[in-house]
Amino acid sequence: MKKIVLLAVISLFFSCNSSAQKKETKEKEVFTITKSEAEWKAQLTEEQYHVLREAGTERPFSSPLNKNDKKGVYHCAACDTPLFKSEHKFDSGTGWPSFDRVIEGNVAFGTDTKIGYTRDEEHCATCGGHLGHVFNDGPRETTGKRHCINGDALKFVPTEG
Ligand SMILES: [Zn+2]
């Protein structure tokens, strides 16, 4: 009898331990650019900090970049990594800048379960700043993806000439 209890305790210990390890691995995502929260706060505007560092969402139709149709590249507002190209931007009608694809390798994906269901969170692969989410209701004629991005997380760099 004692043996069975001991075995149950051991297996409980192992299952807790393995899930704790899993969590640790996820938190260990390493970014090229890391700064303290105080440093980010000093560098970013209040709105940028809320989106990029607290995974916030700006009000729809609030970003001037939502209607921006100029040619150029959208960079990370925190670390200047190029993330999206203007030729992949489309008007989704949602009120947030939307793209059908990312600049490969510069955007990383996580999972955001904060609002109760799983969505695909995306963040800057260089600094870890939160950008927005990706959905499967994008333009069918291209990728079918809708990268719904907060304008506050972006800095638009127009193409010269
Ligand atoms: Zn960044």
Image (cartoon, rainbow, N blue to C red):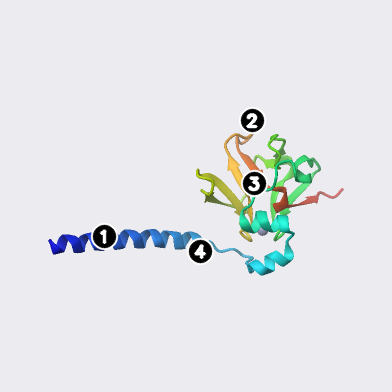
Question: Which image quadrant for residue 87?
Answer: top right
Query: Which badge, 3 or 2, comes first in the chain's sequence?
Result: 3
- Mark 1 element type: helix
Residue 145 image point, x, y percent: 60, 38
Say above or below: 45 vs 58: below
Q: Rounded to the nearest whole Å, what is the CA distance between mark 3 and mark 2? A: 16 Å
Q: Rounded to the nearest whole Å, what is the CA distance between mark 2 and mark 1? A: 51 Å
Q: Amino acid at mark 4?
A: Lys
Q: Residue at x 72, y 51 (%)?
A: 152
Query: Which badge, 2 or 1, comes first in the chain's sequence?
Result: 1
What mark, if any, has residue 11 been given in the picture? 1
Query: Which badge, 2 or 4, comes first in the chain's sequence?
Result: 4
Q: Amino acid at mark 1?
A: Ser
Q: Rounded to the nearest whole Å, what is the CA distance between mark 2 and mark 4? A: 37 Å
Give the label, 1 or 3, closer to the camera: 1
- Mark 3 element type: loop
In terms of image quarters, where does ligand 1 lie?
A: bottom right
- Residue placed under numbered mark 4 in the picture: 28
